[in-house]
Image (spheres, rainbow, N blue to C red):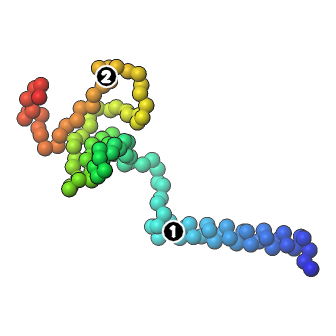
Amino acid sequence: MASPFATTLTALAALAVVLGLVWLASRAARWGGLAPRQTGPRRLVVQDAIALDARRRLTLVRCDDHSVLLLTGGAQDLVVGWVNQQWSVVSGQSSGVQQADVPRPDVQRPDVQRSDVEPGA
């Protein structure tokens, strides 16, 4: 019969081997490109997404200091416009601020020049 010390030592050795194999598998996955690498802060962030219906979504995506509004899920994806003004949206929470007090983002359509748009339209 084995002593309790030998049994504990065998269990600890088996645990060390299993943890070493898990560590090696994670390193191999990163080297092979199966696991994402975190090299720093993310440059591309989905700030907000709203489901318009069963198929279409309106998504606000930010890359560095630029934000773009995308309409996805239809026959083709569409760039609605670039958001120039810095603003933050907290989904599902009301701030108690009147609608007139909330700054509106300046959305610029990529296919329409500002000189083509009539004032007040």
Tell me, yes or no, if residue 3 can be seen here.
yes
User: In the depicted view, which residue is nearer to us: 1 or 66?
Assistant: 1
* Residue at (79% x, 70% y) in the render: 11
User: In the depicted view, which residue is nearer to us: 31 or 92?
Assistant: 92
Q: Earlier in the sequence, mark 2 or mark 1?
A: 1
In terms of image quadrants, where is residue 59?
top left
Instruction: From the top left corner, tell me how far across and down residue 54 is, in percent.
Output: 31, 50
Q: Amino acid at mark 2?
A: Gln
* Residue at (22% x, 47% y) in the render: 79
Instruction: From the top left corner, tell me how far across and down residue 112 is, in percent.
Output: 12, 40
* Residue at (38% x, 34% y) in the render: 89
Q: Amino acid at mark 1?
A: Ala
Residue 15, placed above or below residue 98: below
In terms of image quadrants, where is residue 13?
bottom right
* Residue at (24% x, 40% y) in the render: 82
Q: Quadrant of the N terminus?
A: bottom right
Which residue corresponds to mark 1? 29
Residue 15 is tagged as: none
Which residue corresponds to mark 2? 99
